[in-house]
Image (cartoon, rainbow, N blue to C red):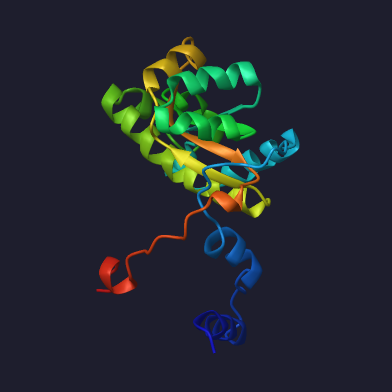
Amino acid sequence: MTLLWRLQHKYTTEGTINLIPDDAIKTIFESGRSHRYYLDRKVDEMLLQRIYELAILAPSASNLCPLRVTFVVSENQKAKVIEAAADGNKAKIKSAPVVAIIAHDEKYYDLIEKLSPHMDGNAFRNKSDAELTQIAIENSWLQAGLLIAAVRSLGLDSGAMSGFDKNVIDDYFYKNSSWRSNFLLNIGYGDETELHPRGPRPSFEEACQIL
């Protein structure tokens, strides 16, 4: 009898909300892997839109939603990303049908009145640049984690990369905007033959506390 079954039974009998199905948990977490190389198969642009629609439902401080995404699919634009990438990442980007630039908007506060009408927008605008940037980075990374889960939930695979020159990416893609890059995320249908065995993870006892 698995822990998941016992939790499901407990929650159901107590009248609280049911867990999501086991196969969904397996798809998003247990079977989900970070892929390096991809099959020669295009990703429908409607799927990219759906990825964003799911990811933007992720939590962020005061619903500020600083996450921004540039889905790069054309070969000439991908070439600019490859140019900025570390040598070890160039072939991976070339293999992927989509490389998403996961970014944050340093002027996310311009949407405060729309997204958080209960908040005082000027209170944010009066913060220091360092404070504003920290809020944007922290919350966009939080939302990006859910974006990866959204990718997996739609039957796609991904692989995140930090090895690239942010200045090159920002100068080319975001020169006249307030967006700034965080990391790159290859998206596509992963080539499982290129996967290494899954690496071990710290155990609950090694990584968690219940106080």
Residue at position x 60%, y 49% in the image: 150
Q: Is residue 184 left or right of residue 42?
A: left
Residue at position x 36%, y 39% in the image: 138
**Of the pair 195 and 9, the residue shown nearer to us:** 195
Q: Is residue 117 visible?
A: no
Please tell me whether residue 34 is drawn above or below residue 20 in the rendered image.
above
Residue 71: name its quadrant: top right
**Of the pair 40 and 4, the residue shown nearer to us:** 40
- Whole-percent x and y of residue 25? 58, 66
Residue lying at the far bottom in this picture: please name it.
1
Residue lying at the far front in this picture: please name it.
193
> Quarter holding the N terminus?
bottom right
Q: Is residue 88 left or right of residue 78?
A: left
> Quarter holding the C terminus?
bottom left
Please tell me whether residue 18 is drawn above or below residue 163 in the rendered image.
below
Q: Is residue 196 visible?
A: yes
- Whole-percent x and y of residue 113? 52, 29
Residue at position x 60%, y 35% in the image: 96
- Whole-percent x and y of residue 124? 36, 28
Please tell me whether residue 137 is drawn above or below residue 206 in the rendered image.
above
Residue at position x 45%, y 60% in the image: 198
Residue lying at the far top in this picture: please name it.
176
- Whole-percent x and y of residue 209? 26, 70
Q: How many marks do you count on the picture?
A: 0
